Structure formats: structure tokens, C-alpha cells
Image (cartoon, helix red, strand yellow):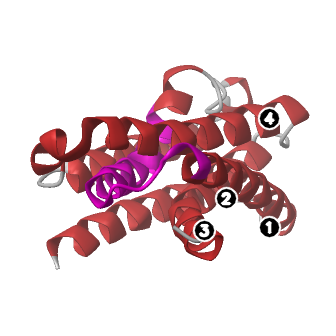
Amino acid sequence: MALTEIFLIAVALAMDAFTVAVAIGLHLSGRGGINPRQYFRLGFHFGLFQFLMPIIGWLAGETISRYIETFDHWIALVLLVYIGVKLIHEGGRADRYSLPDPTRGISLIVLSVATSIDALAVGISMAILGAAIIYPAVIIGLVAGLFTLAGLKLSDRISSRWRTRVAWLGAVILFAIGLKIVIEHTL
């Protein structure tokens, strides 16, 4: 597989991570800003999961693909809607500055899995094609990590202009990503 093809796949896979990073960044900016640890945690975890999922998919190969492809988009939708509802709920609370950080704990894991499910399918496809996986997985992970950081930075700039109701905007973005994934898989 050529480097250009791998890079294009990585960019396509990183778009969900970028968009979710914007949504989370909007939420964090509404809570007082994004600190360097939050940048690191989200970028690292999104990149790590985007790196690991193609490898897991590749190892699973054709065995698991027929089981996952029928409902993987629904898993992603449920996870993203869950986080979106949580953002709306937390954004409407008066004490939102004291709420848990979405770049920590179970929220971080749920977001990392939700944004990397498509990478699992790419790994399965690469196994079926007989392609190597480590080099593409490294590129996929690095691109996802960088796109995540870019999404957080963009959201920080957006939120400085529109501080009110950023949790709602972030939740709408997550819902839209979930619906996009379902629509792509049902057409």
C-alpha cells in the first residue's frame, strides 16, 4: 500500500476524532479553558486508539468482520449520543465548572472507542487484502492525534467568541457524527 493511500485513509479516519475534539474542546472552553494536560490526554488517547484498532481488526481478520459490520455503526451512535447527552446535562448545570473532566476516566475511553471503530474495519479490510498493518497503523494513529490537537485548538478559538451554550453545540456535533456513521452504513 502506497504512502499516499495510507495518508488519505488516515485523514479520513481522523475526521471523526477532529470533530469530537472540537465538541469536547467547546465543552472544556465553557468550563474555563483547555489546559495542556487535557490536550495531551485527548490527543494521546485518540491517537492510541486509532493506532490500536486497525491492528486489532487486522488480527481478527475475516473471523470477526461479519459480526461487527452489521452493528458497529450503532455502537458508535450510542456512545456518541451518550456523551452528547452528558454534555447537554452538564452544560446546563450552574456548577458546571466543578463537573468531571471529559478527558478523563470512562468518558475518555468511550470517546476513544467511538471515534476509532471505523479504524477497526480498516484493519479487517487490510487483513483481507493481505497488507501489512504496523506502518499504516502508526500513520493512522499519528494523524488522528494531530487532528485531535487541531480540533481542540480550533474549539478554543471558537468558544472565545461564543461562550454561551457551547455544550449544546458540542452535543449537536456528536449527535451529527453518530447519525452520519449510521447513514453511511445503511446506504
Q: Secondary structure at mark 3?
A: helix
- In the shown orientation, is residue 28 left or right of residue 4? right
Lower position in the chain sequence, tag 4 or tag 3: 3
Residue 122 placement (x, y as % from top left): 38, 57
Specify whether residue 92 is in view: no
The residue labelled by disc 2 is 22
What amino acid is found at the position of numbered circle 1 in the picture?
Answer: Ile
Q: Nearer the viewer, mark 1 or mark 2?
A: 2
To which quarter of the image does residue 45 belong? top right
Q: CA distance from mark 2 to mark 4?
A: 15 Å
Magenta region: 110-135
- What amino acid is found at the position of numbered circle 4 in the picture? Phe
| Of the image marks 1 and 3, the number of the one nearer the N terminus | 3
SS at badge 1: helix
User: Decide: marks 1, 2 in contact (CB < 8 A)?
Assistant: yes
Identify the residue shown where x is 25% and y is 43%: 61
Residue 158 is labelled as 1
Q: Nearer the viewer, mark 4 or mark 1?
A: 4
How far across and how far down the image is residue 72, in percent? 23, 50
Graded by Cα atoms within 10 Å as few (under 14), some (14 to 19) or many (20 or more), the crowding at tag 4 reads: some
Mark closer to the observer (2, 4): 4
